[in-house]
Image (cartoon, helix red, strand yellow):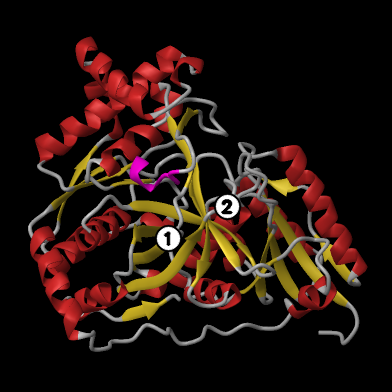
Amino acid sequence: MSADKLIYGVAALGRPTFDVPFAEEKLAEAFAALDAAGIQTVGPREMLYDADAATAAIETIKAAGAIDALLIIQVTFTDATMTVELARGATAPVAIWAIPEPRLGGRLRLNAFCGLNLAAHALGKADIAHGSLFADPASPGLTEDLRALARAYAATPSRAARAAPPSAAEAAAAHAIDRISGAGITVIGDHPAGFDTCTYDGGELNALAGIGVNALPIEALFDKAKSVEPSRVDAIRETVQADLTGLDALDQEQLDRSFRVFAALEAVRDETDAKGLAVRCWPETFTEYGCAACGPMAMMNERRTPSACEADVYGSFSTLLLQELAGEAVWMADLVDIDFDDDTAVFWHCGLAPLSMCDPEATPEATIHTNRKMPLLHQFPLKPGPITLARLSRARNETKLVVGRADVRRAPMAFTGTSGVVSFAAPAREVFDTILAEGLEHHYSVAYGDHVDAVRAVAARLDLPVLELC
C-alpha cells in the first residue's frame, strides 16, 4: 500500500424498492468524499441491484490490477448475497461503508444500517474478516476514516462467555424454560434469499429447549385466508376499528385481505398447536396475495403468539422466551440507526409492534407499507421505559444468547411504522463495534423491564455462553 496514494475497488449496493433518487444523491456524495480523500476508485460508479451486476463489477475491479481495499458501499438495505459474492472474490482487505439517513418521521429511505448488519453476519459465518464504517459522506474527519479502511482486518475472538447468573433470577428462568419446553414454532414459508440471519437448525432447537419446528408453505396461509368467513372478517374489523385510527382511508379490499391473514395466522397457530410463528412476510404477501402481513402479525404478538417476520425461527424463539420472562407482549425489531453524536439508536419494524407498546401520549394509526404501499400496518412511537434486548444467536457459527439493556426515550417517531429511540446501557459506539465485530443477526427481541439476569440464568440452564451487548 502506498503511503499516500490509495486505490479502492468500489461496489455500491442498492435495492430499487427504496428511495432511489435519494440513494443516488448520497452515492454521488460518497464518491466525492472518496475523491476528496485522495482515494482512486475502480469499478462502476452506479448502484448494483442484482448478483449479475455484482459479478460483473468484481471482474471489472480485478481487471484494473492491484487494489488496496475492496470497499462495498451499502447505499440502501440489501440482503447479503451480493456482499458475500464480492467478498469471496476479493484479493485485498474488505470493508463496508453504510450511509445513515435523517430521522424525519417518514419512511426509511435507505435502511442501510440494517444491510450492514446483515452483511456483517453473513461474512462472520463465512469467516471473512472486514472493516465497517457508518458515516454520512459529509461527516467531519471522514478522510481519515476512509483511508483507514485499507488496513487488513483480522477476526477478533468472540466476547461470548459462560457465567454464573444471580440466584434470584433462577426461579424466573426455570419457570420460562418449563413453559416453553415441548412448545412448537410453526414456520410459514422459507426465509428470503440472502438472509443468513434467519437460518435455523430444528434439531438444535429441539435438543436445546425441547422446541419442535413445524413447516408450512406460504401458499397454505393464503389458502386459509381466502376461506375465512365474511362474518369473521367483520368481527376482526370491529376490533381493529376500536384500536386504530385511519382504517377508512386505506384500500378496503387490501385491508380485507390483511384481516383474513390475521384469521389465517390464528388458524395455523391452533391447528399446529404452535406457541410461536415465523412468517415469510414478504414479498409474496404483497405480490401474490395483495396485502401486508405486518399488522396481522402485530395483532398476534399482542395476543401472546410471538410472530417473527422473514421466517426467523430463532427470532420467534427469542421472543417467546422473553415473553415468558416478561409476562407481557414482546416485539421483534430491526436496529436501523445509531447516532454516535447523541448516543442514541432506533429500533424499528414496518408495523409489527404490539399495541401495548404504544406511547400513551400518541394515537396508534393504521397505515400502509412504505415500500409496497399496502395495508395493514401499525404506526406509533414506543412508550418510554427500560427495555431488555435478547436473541438466540448463531453468529460466527456459535450458538449463544445475546442480551442487553436500554431505555426508550420519549421522542418524535423516527420513521414510519413502529419505532423507538433508545439509549443503550453502554456507549452507542461500543454497541456498534460489538454488533459488527460479532456479526450479530439483525433481529432483536424487545421486552419492557429489566430481565437481563433472568436471560443469563436461562443461558446457564441451557449451557449456552452469553454475549453482553450492553
- Res 410 visible: yes
Instruction: Judge whether 226 appears above or below 75 on screen.
Output: above
Q: Amino acid at mark 2?
A: Ala
Instruction: Judge whether 129 appears above or below 182 on screen.
Output: below
Instruction: Give the residue drawn at x 18%, y 34%.
Output: 268
- The residue at which mark 2 appears reads as 411
Describe residue 457's horizontal placement relative to residue 378 as left or right.
Answer: left
Task: Check residue 139 in the rendering and tell me which mark sits there, or answer none.
Answer: none
Query: Residue 362: percent from the left, percent from the top?
Result: 49, 40
Instruction: Give the residue drawn at x 81%, y 71%.
Output: 142
Q: Quadrant of the C terminus?
A: bottom left
Query: Residue 389: percent from the left, percent from the top?
Result: 38, 65
Q: CA distance from mark 2 to mark 1?
A: 12 Å
Query: Residue 52: percent from the left, percent from the top?
Result: 62, 46
Residues 334 and 199: in front is 334
Q: Secondary structure at mark 2?
A: loop
Counting residues from the start of the chain, the first of labels 2 and 1 encountered is 1
Residues 302 and 95: in front is 302
Q: Amino acid at mark 1?
A: Gly
User: So how many labels did they put on this image?
Assistant: 2
- The residue at which mark 1 appears reads as 385
Q: Which residues are magenta?
A: 355-360
Q: Is 175 included in the stretch rendered in magenta? A: no
Describe residue 344's horizontal placement relative to residue 250 as left or right.
Answer: right
- Res 392 visible: no
| Image quarter of residue 433 | bottom right
